Each structure stands twice: as structure tokens, then as C-alpha cells.
Image (spheres, helix red, strand yellow):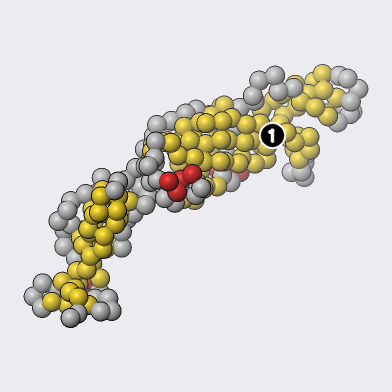
Amino acid sequence: MATPAYDHFFMCRSFNVFPSDQLINGRVVVVKGVDLRQKTIKAKYSAGVIDQEIFYTKAINLRLKVYNTDQYQCTFNRPTATVAMEDVYDDYFVIRNLELRECNSGQLFADVEFLRGIRDDNADYSYLKAEKIYNIQIGSIGCHPSCKVCNGTLDTNCKICSNPTYKLFMGKCYPECPPAAKEKDSYQIVYHNVEMTQVICTSICPFGKYSEQGTNTCLQCN
């Protein structure tokens, strides 16, 4: 019976992740690569014998960042996401729970860390070693076509509508307000140093405003 392996020879990185310019639209992203689940690697035993062992991926850690963005918050409030081992396969893994936060445009990159070791029959790991690959492009992020300004990639993440005549309701742009929120209010935001106004739909005008008869527009009380 061989004595336990105490080192593994990573002459080269034992996995690879392929860069992608896929359009990111939602909270789930598929990342492709090779040898992502496991890899047979040469290992040195305590007796000095060189043999092979299968090193399994125990965990994948991501550090996300966005380039080509004008959002200052991205520097300190980076996107976050998770990778579960049940979503890791030999040729791809799935990123879930992607939160872009304020990073709503640009190119999404990741520093990827694989934690690998020898796995026994009880699914316990030993001789763990971390391998990393830096600055891999995961995809391109940006607003849905219906949004001019957004806080995510879905059509429900709009802050300003692309069509200036459309109204915003629960983050989505509509030609007209739905019956359940027929009152029309508005708000202003500054984007690229330009003040923009967006009409929004609400079920009731906010405090200090009243609904104008015939137009359902919320007006300031005198």
C-alpha cells in the first residue's frame, strides 16, 4: 500500500478557463474551460516515489471586477456571485446569484481560484493547494435595450427608459401605466453629468401631491 502523497507537481496550471464576451443578462452565467472538476496529476510520495493522483476541485472562489465603466462605486462595491460544486463540470461551471450592484456597464472580469486536493471515500480532502488564474473576461454587461439607464441587465432593472415617452413601473418600461398604478409621478437623476427625468407609475400620489383629474398626473399641492 502506497504511503500518502504529500506534494503534487503543478508544472503548469491544472485547469483552464476560457475568456468570453457573452452578453450577461441575468444572475446566472456559464463559464467554459477544461479540467474544471478534476485532474490527474503527478504526485510525490513520502518514500520519494513519483506516481499519479486524481486531484479534485473542492471549491471555486471568484473575485469579480468591471472595466470600462463610469460608475465610481464599482471600485469599492464590486459585483458578487457564487459557485456551488454541484454546478461544476469538467468543461464548464455555472456562476449564480450574480449581483452587479452599481456596476451596470462595461466588461466583467474575474480572478478565479481553484482549491484542489486528494479526496477519500468519505469525501474528505487532504493535501489541498490553491491555483489561480487572473483577469479572465467573463462577459459584457450593459442595460437591456428598453433601458437607457439601469442597475442591472434585465428589462426590470430600468431607471430611465430608452423611449422618452414610456413610463416606468417596478423597473420596467411601458407605453402606458397599468390600471393598478395609473397615477403618473416623476423623478430626476443625474447621469453623465446630465439631469434626466423619468415618468413613473404609482397606485397613489405621494404625500404632498394630488392627482390631476383627467390626466392622472401627480401635481404638487399649493
Picture coordinates of residue 110 (x, y %)?
Answer: 52, 36
Residue in the picture at 86% in, 19% down: 49
Name the amino acid type tagged 1. Answer: Ala
The residue positioned farthest toward the left in the image shown: 214
Residue in the picture at 69% in, 34% down: 130
Q: Name the residue under label 1.
A: 130
Nearer to the camera, 26 or 40: 26
Q: In this view, does 180 lie above or below 160?
A: below
Task: Tell me the quadrant of the picture where the N terminus can be found.
Answer: top right
Picture coordinates of residue 29 (x, y %)?
Answer: 45, 41
Picture coordinates of residue 214 (x, y %)?
Answer: 8, 75
Nearer to the camera, 54 or 1: 54
Task: Tell me the quadrant of the picture where the C terminus can be found.
Answer: bottom left
Nearer to the camera, 120 or 195: 195
Picture coordinates of residue 115 (x, y %)?
Answer: 68, 37
The residue positioned farthest toward the bottom in the image shown: 222
Instruction: Please give left or right for residue 11 compared with residue 47 in the image.
Output: left
